Image (cartoon, grey):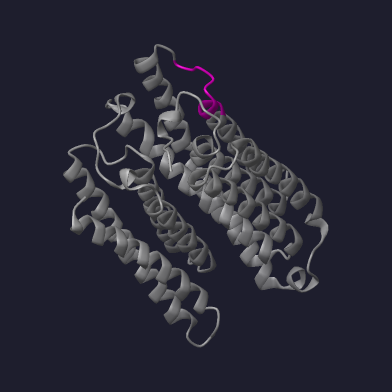
């Protein structure tokens, strides 16, 4: 990996961290808020451009499409998260989502930087990935995951603006527990059965209790017209992100079946990761149906979007780091 590529990647990572802090600082002063927000967006755009060039440079150096291992997929995920926020921020003029999007990108940069050196270096493809289907199948999936993350983060902000602070706290704690399980599964030798229990158990319990306590509302937020308007906007932002991610996930699943038939002679083998991708697809199909039909309140839909974020995290990283196995286990590595 060239020094130029390393410099570009580091620039993108540092930009995401700086953008996060500037977005956070923008809430400290109403006088300088607009200036701080614009500065944070500019810093994030600089990081997005740097990461775009870094990914292209890596592909040129590798003489292949630069999406073949976990490290490269994390670069793509951070790129899609940053780009997705830049898109929705232009469409809606939102700012609060910026610090969450920047924090997510920075977290995945850090996660990738702690991977073994073998993941960072450009290496020959493993036999299972030597196919033109790789560049057709994987990018739509990674971008869909990023959009689903943005939808889940928008759901958190919707709960905040709607005054559902108890449900918000439970949702944040649930996401933190799930991420902890992923981190321990990636970097330690902790028994995977305990990590599976931590991830699945916290996700189920946290989601159920988040739903259960939606009735606890902060009176000040409920009475505020500005909060109601912001809550409606974040509900719309979440739906917009899902509307982009869902067809991309659909394309990824279909092309995955075509690749599986080409490689293994079967379109569908009920591999754990395949099955989880289907569950994630069904969850977002349900979200879209419920959102369009208005069968659930915006707050309940926000909890559904947070559940979708957890399912996405399990589909993307969980099946390798938590030891579920399957035909996609070639993506796992030894710490």
The answer to whether residue 52 of the structure is visible from this angle is yes
Q: Is residue 146 above or below residue 252?
A: below
Q: Is residue 3 left or right of residue 129?
A: left
Q: Looking at the rendering, which quadrant does residue 214 occupy?
A: bottom right
Magenta region includes residue 222: no
Where, quadrant-wise, is the C terminus in this rendering?
Answer: top left
> 109 or 307, which is in the foreground?
109
Q: Is residue 295 left or right of residue 117?
A: right
Magenta region includes residue 269: yes
Q: Is residue 32 above or below residue 62?
A: below
Label tally: 0
Q: Is residue 80 above or below residue 39?
A: above
Judged from this view, the residue extending furthest toward the bottom is: 31
The segment highlighted magenta reads 267-275
Residue drawn at the location 32% of the way across and 37% of the way down: 68
Where residue 233 sits: x, y (%)? 59, 61
Residue drawn at the location 47% of the way across and 73% of the way down: 21
> 32 or 74, which is in the foreground?
74
Where residue 274 sits: x, y (%)? 51, 26
Residue drawn at the location 40% of the way across and 19% of the way down: 260
Q: Is residue 40 left or right of residue 311?
A: left
Q: Is residue 127 above or below residue 220?
A: above
> 139 or 289, which is in the foreground?
139
Where residue 279 sits: x, y (%)? 59, 31
Where residue 316 sits: x, y (%)? 49, 39
Judged from this view, the residue extending furthest toward the top is: 265
Q: Looking at the rendering, which quadrant does residue 257 occupy?
A: top left
The answer to whether residue 240 of the structure is visible from this angle is no
């Amino acid at each position: 990996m060239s020094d130029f590529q390393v410099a570009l990647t580091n620039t993108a990572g540092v930009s995401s961290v700086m953008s996060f802090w500037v977005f956070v600082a923008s809430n400290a002063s109403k006088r300088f808020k607009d200036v701080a927000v614009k500065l944070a967006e500019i810093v994030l755009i600089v990081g997005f451009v740097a990461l775009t060039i870094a990914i292209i440079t890596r592909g040129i150096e590798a003489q292949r499409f630069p999406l073949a291992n976990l490290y490269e997929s994390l670069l793509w995920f951070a790129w899609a998260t940053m780009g997705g926020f830049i898109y929705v921020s232009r469409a809606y003029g939102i700012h609060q989502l910026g610090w969450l999007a920047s924090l997510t990108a920075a977290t995945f940069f850090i996660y990738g930087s702690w991977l073994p050196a073998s993941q960072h270096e450009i290496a020959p493809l493993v036999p299972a990935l030597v196919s033109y289907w790789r560049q057709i199948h994987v990018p739509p999936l990674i971008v869909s995951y990023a959009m689903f993350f943005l939808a889940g983060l928008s759901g958190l902000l919707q709960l905040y603006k709607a005054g559902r602070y108890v449900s918000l706290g439970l949702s944040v704690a649930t996401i933190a527990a799930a991420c902890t399980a992923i981190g321990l599964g990636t970097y330690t030798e902790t028994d995977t059965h305990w990590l599976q229990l931590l991830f699945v158990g916290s996700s189920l319990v946290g989601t159920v209790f988040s739903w259960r306590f939606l009735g606890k509302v902060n009176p000040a937020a409920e009475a505020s017209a500005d909060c109601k308007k912001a809550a409606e906007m974040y509900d719309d932002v979440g739906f917009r992100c899902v509307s982009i991610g869902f067809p991309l996930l659909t394309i990824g699943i279909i092309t995955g079946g075509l690749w599986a038939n080409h490689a293994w002679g079967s379109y569908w083998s009920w591999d754990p990761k395949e099955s989880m991708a289907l569950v994630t697809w069904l969850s977002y199909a349900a979200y879209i149906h419920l959102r369009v039909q208005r069968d659930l309140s915006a707050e309940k839909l926000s909890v559904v979007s947070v559940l979708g974020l957890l399912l996405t995290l399990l589909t993307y990283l969980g099946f390798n780091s938590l030891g579920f196995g399957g035909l996609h286990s070639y993506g796992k590595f030894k710490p």
